[in-house]
Image: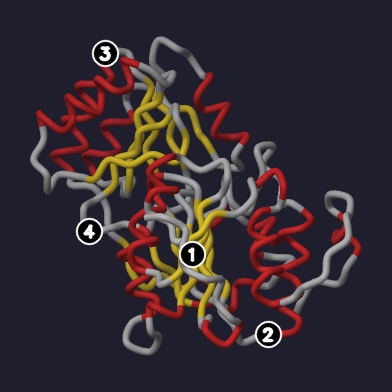
Amino acid sequence: MSAVVSVPRPEEIDLIISDVDGTLLDSHHRLHPRTYHALDWLRRNKPQLPIVIATGKQRSAVGEIRTPLNLDVFPASHLNGCVVYQPHGKVQVEVGLDLEILIKLYTEYHAAQVTMLYYDRDRVYEVPGSDGLVWGEKMRGFGEHVHTVDASFIDKIKDGSVNIIKAAICHSAGARMESFRASLKSEYSATAFTLTQAVPFCLELIPTTGSKGIALAKIIGTSLDPRRVIAFGDGENDVSMFKVAGYSVAMANAMTVAKENATHNTLSSDEGGVGAFLEKIYGIEYSEKSYDYWLNRPVLA
């Protein structure tokens, strides 16, 4: 979709929803001061305007955004829309992968010595492959709470000790990663899971009943017009919510598929692209600030 739709006016926006990594956070996993400044301005001047987090990460991994902006008063979409929270962290909806599919995936990829990540509502479980612990360390850099486990973890999956919501295959981007995608599509039915990516080294498998788009639809329900929603994102996993929202904004650093499905483009996350676009809508004035300048500001009530 080409970016030909005019920038919306403030009165045309009833809800803002945004991805986190590569969108609100920059390539060093920091909240850009320009983006924080715009969101803080909205929270102080338009406190009833919902600002919704939509991320592949767990709720516990985004406290550095949620807390200073007091976003707990709004719904949130986590684990790529598989867990939808009502305000103040109450679970509204949770969906997970089928047990038989999980066992088959575990057996196949553990035998191939490929690193797999398994997500429940609060933790990430890493079953390392021949690459060792490199991928778990990378995900810790994104703020995820990764726990390395051994092969006996399959017993916890089988007996229900853990409720796995989504899984991920980790490998360097390239031909082998693409071969994983192709084999998963050919070996499993279309209803087994949805494949999506937010980062090149991690191929995510989520329930077909969960996505950022499905979560957005649940959040707005019948009370809001989706045409009055603006969504920000950079990944393949953001496309589903782009298709629900009336306005969708792809970051300059976004995957091609996100740019192709967005109504608008903005600067990169390293340049505070979300903040820059919100400035255009709301006439917010910004002067260059240091990172973390807000740490001494009082937390919004």
> Is any part of residue 82 visible from this angle?
no
Mark 2 and mark 4: Cα distance apart in space = 33 Å
**What's the residue type where badge 3 is placed?**
Ala
Q: Residue at x 34, y 38 (%)?
A: 204
Mark 3 and mark 1: Cα distance apart in space = 38 Å
Helix or strand or loop: what does disc 3 sit on?
loop
Residue located beneath label 3 in the image: 112
Q: Position of residue 55 (x, y in %)?
A: 48, 54
**What's the residue type where badge 4 is placed?**
Thr
Residue nearer the viewer, 6 or 99: 6
**What's the residue type where badge 2 is placed?**
Lys
Helix or strand or loop: what does disc 1 sit on?
strand
Q: Are marks 1 and 2 in contact (CB under 8 Å)?
A: no
Q: Are marks 3 and 4 in contact (CB under 8 Å)?
A: no
Residue nearer the viewer, 149 or 285: 285
Residue located beneath label 4 in the image: 209
Residue located beneath label 1 in the image: 231
Q: Are marks 3 and 1 in contact (CB under 8 Å)?
A: no
Relative horizontal placement of residue 295, taking residue 268 as reference (left or right) = right
Are there few (<14), some (14-19), or many (20+) residues within 10 Å of tag 2? Answer: few
Q: Position of residue 203 (x, y in %)?
A: 35, 33
Residue located beneath label 2 in the image: 46
**Which mark's residue is nearer the viewer, 4 or 1?**
1
Q: Earlier in the sequence, mark 1 or mark 2?
A: 2
Helix or strand or loop: what does disc 2 sit on?
loop
